Image (spheres, rainbow, N blue to C red):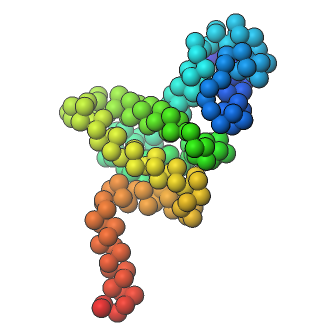
Amino acid sequence: MDRRVQKTKAAIRQAYFSLLMEKKSRKMTVTELARRANIDRKTFYLHYDTTDEVLKDYHQELTRKLLGILREQDFFTQQFDMTNFYSAINQVVNENMDLFRQIALMDCANWFWKQSLESLIKGICDIYQEKCAVPRQELCLYSRFILTGTLEIYQQWLRGNLPVSLEELGRMTTNVALFGFSSALKSGKQENSENTGGF
């Protein structure tokens, strides 16, 4: 991508999130967004048709970033490794921590997480569809099941409701995704039994 285009799109995105935090709503006009980005409306329309497309473009970039990290780790050519998966998610969260934290605290931000979810599901299903015999509809269902819980857990963490480190959060979500709720309960019973001397 041309450097000038990158610079303009970065200015538009920064203006979009600045207005989002200020207004606590994604309802904004092209005029106010262009003014905040220090460009004219015509320049905005060279890159986007609507203000909502700015957010869609951002989600696609985040998805590309996450999938790129996973490709670098040969994630898609080896046995499915949840540890690497959540490590990649943590890296993306870490790089966008301030923005994600602010959005997680907004009451009206469900649309942000929904768009994140849909973008991730599509990206993962597009890759795995070529690599496995599972029908796409089923593959998307599995992805939705894992990613819906993952996004909810990370939102709670970003809101400060889970007092653990990002690394510990990744470990816990990996365990739940790999072994399920019954495994966590079994582990909890063992710890409880050891702490009470087996009673």
Quadrant location, the N terminus: top right
Quadrant location, the C terminus: bottom left
Classify residue 1 as left or right of residue 186.
right
Q: What residue is rendered at 40% in x and 56% in y? A: 174
Q: What residue is rendered at 58% in x and 53% in y? A: 159
Residue 94: x and y in percent read: 61, 48
Residue 22: x and y in percent read: 72, 35
Residue with the most extreme right position: 38
Q: Does residue 101 lie above or below 57 as drawn?
A: below
Classify residue 20 as left or right of residue 112.
right
Q: Does residue 85 lie above or below 180 as drawn?
A: above
- Decide if residue 84 is in sight here: no
- Decide if residue 187 is in sight here: yes
Say which of 39 and 9 sits in front: 39
Residue 84: x and y in percent read: 44, 49
Classify residue 130 as left or right of residue 15.
left
Q: What residue is rendered at 42% in x and 56% in y? A: 173
Residue 30: x and y in percent read: 67, 16
Quarter holding residue 49: top right
Q: What residue is rendered at 57% in x and 64% in y? A: 163
